Image (spheres, grey):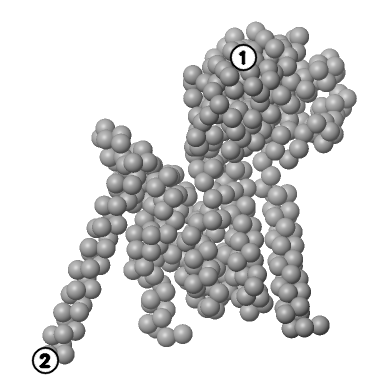
Amino acid sequence: MSKAELKETALGGIISNPVFVLVLGTCPTIAKSDTISNAIGLGLATAFVLICSNIFISLLRKLIPDKVRLPAYIVIIATFVTLVQLFVAKFLPDLNTSIGAFIPLIVVNCIILGRAEAFASKNGVLMSALDGVSMGLGFTLAIGLMGAIRQGLGAIGLTLFQKTAGGFIVFGLLMALFNFVFYIINARKTKALFEKGGN
Amino acid sequence: MTKATKDTIKAVIVLFIIALVCVALLAVANVFLKTVPTLDSATASKINTIAPSGVDDATAFSEGYFKLYSEEELASAGFDLKAFNKEKGNATNKVTAVYRVVKGQNAGAFIVESTGKGYYDITMLTAFDEEGKISGVIAKTQTEDKFSGQIFNEDKFELFKQSVIGKSELPSDSELNAVTGATTMSSMRGLRQAVTIATVVIPRLNSVADALEVENE
């Protein structure tokens, strides 16, 4: 494992942010980012499932035949989702009332299955765990940021932003901003490379 | 045996083992993470709404106006809750707890906590008078409003309450749908299941009412 690969994986949650760059897991992102607590709660639940499923899928990657890899991944992911659901129902009843309906839907969250298929099934346990942490935190930060903005706008009377339509607007604007910032950074990097080459 | 057959058998065995390990893990987790009903202040407040004790919520809770019966207490009085759920309920539709007003205005009234399956799990609290008729009904937990239907919005739930209060049996599905609107059918199914099983358990609870302790420890 090279240093560059390690850095790329560790920063994957930001550079290839699952929400704003890969546009995965949009449904829960818009549905449950109406308040910060809901957003962080769902983000952390998703991150936990992502880390655990990445580790287990990576551990079992050589044993799982290609024919049944998707059903096997889904069974593993569903197990961790059920564990999260039981935990939230027992210890965080208020959060359960608020986001409980969306926890089972983590099973079909594209981020989880996407990372299992694209990363964990092809890489070692440590790298997969790191990818899970990075992507999980990237998702939590993205949904948390949306939650903060929507709750803030709702608090000053713009209640539209606490509804689904407002979620779409905030999501679109943040995605545009995120991509614009990375466009500028990449443009500067390219310019610097050309200048270096020219000298 | 051809290679394709061998591969298929291997795939089935691997998937079976993964499923078995996952089920075992969940079975162990369920022992530690199973939700046990508790009589907390939020529940006491809801009970005080549907079976008023005559004092405010905080007093009713702190001074023990309500009692939650454990399965052992019910069993020692002659009612086996587990057996009842096995006989009349299923994994998503069952009686999860039995409460009683032990002091104040509605002393002696039973409140049954029961679950039903709408779009998601619904937990209802149903209060009964001494004749076994529904005197009040309220949702303990529900997330139906996250989906279409909005059965628990004030208007529709009010209509549902009007249809069931004072009755010992629920009206038919079609009657309830006619009252609350067909768009709420899935949520209504869960709501009806939860309240129906509460009406089924109440004659059995009434038959052992005298044997049940009415003092809070």
Q: Position of residue A41 (x, y in %)?
A: 47, 48
- Quadrant hosting residue A2: bottom left
What is the three-letter code of the residue carrying label 2? Answer: Asn
Q: Residue at label 2?
A: A199
Q: Position of residue A142 (x, y in %)?
A: 36, 56
Residue situated in front as seen by the camera: B114 or A6: B114
Placement of B79 over or under A30, stated as above or below: above
Tag 1's secondary structure? helix
What is the three-letter code of the residue carrying label 1? Answer: Ser
Q: Which residue appears at 53% of the width and 78% of the height?
A: A122
Chain designation of label 2: A
Placement of A163 over or under B57, stated as above or below: below
Tag 2's secondary structure? loop
Q: Position of residue A70 (x, y in %)?
A: 60, 66
Q: Residue at label 1?
A: B163
Placement of B47 over or under B83, stated as above or below: above
